[in-house]
Amino acid sequence: MKSKKLIVVVGPTAIGKTKLAIALAEYFKTQIISSDSRQFFKEMRIGTAVPSEEELASVPHHFIQHTSIEQSYSVGDFEKDAINLLEELYKDNDYVIMVGGSGLYTDAVIHGLDTFPEVPPNIRKELNTTLEQNGIESLQKELFEKDPVYYQKVDLMNPHRVIRALEVIRHSGKPFSSFLRKDAEKRSFDAVYVGITAEREIIYERINLRVDEMIKHGLLEEAKSLYNHRKLNALQTVGYKELFRFLDEEITLDFAISEIKKNTRRFAKRQLTWLRKNPDILWVPYDADFKEIVSQINSKIDGHG
């Protein structure tokens, strides 16, 4: 096994990942990398449950509110930046903690981008609009500029194939052809996964409580401040899009809040579906004793887990 370890804290939204990540970072005397793509944006503090000022001050955190919703920041950008940072951190630490609810972003750091990302539907919509307005030639030109390798392979007269490649390119910031390799990236560290779990009723109860807290702490005001940017990709996300519908007078505030809770529960379900595909996760109860968690992690690192 490699001497450097990336301890990866995963689990559904609102389960307590931040709290455990901070406790582990303090225990291992190290720093935290956030792989939560919603928390990258400095304008989206309340709706993405960014750690509190006190939590952020307790140990160094990276990739939290480090960019703007008006900047393009893809999973490819994050992979590159996170790997560069890890190389720096591993000069002084054998352990680094990574935490976040975005499975694709976590996997990109650990394995490289060898699976196709899930692309927001608005990107495909934009490309279809371009096809209707400007014809397939403009899309072919963009593909040639951004991925000459795939340009040579694809049927250029098949708009579905060209659009599929371009939507992945636009969303990920990487050539479509780079996703076609079979082997995962070689990394200089081993990933040790810790997953926090609970009964479904407890997860849902925690989600509902968190949404109520967000509303109490000014989520509606935050959504109002971002209303003019509502078409941006970063804001096509739970917590904002429902409140934009309220601000557009399509639905009531109570209904918007109930929709946020429902859609967050669905998001948690998708997170768990993604995580259950990974047989390497050490699952611990949300209320487990911290010493017991550390003992299990150390046992796994020593090769007994």
Image (cartoon, rainbow, N blue to C red):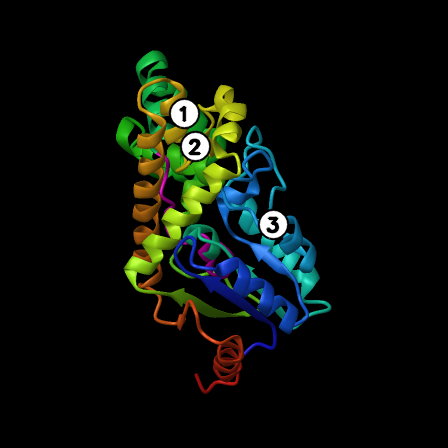
- Residue shown at 60%/46% (left/top)? 64
Camera sees residue 162: no
Marks 3 and 1, the one that precedes in the sequence: 3
What kind of residue is marked 3? Ser
The residue under label 3 is: 52
Q: Where is residue 112 in the image (x, y as percent from the top left)?
A: 48, 56
Q: What stretch is highlighted in magenta?
A: 107-120
Which of the 4 image quadrants contains residue 183? bottom left
Q: Position of residue 138 (x, y in %)?
A: 40, 19
The residue under label 1 is: 244
Q: What element carries label 2?
A: loop
Marks 3 and 2, the one that precedes in the sequence: 3
Which of the 4 image quadrants contains residue 160? top left
The residue under label 2 is: 240
Q: Where is residue 78 in the image (x, y as percent from the top left)?
A: 55, 47
What kind of residue is marked 1? Phe
Query: Farthest residue in the right direction?
Result: 92
Q: Foreground: 276 or 166?
A: 276
Is 32 on the left or on the right of 134, as rendered?
right
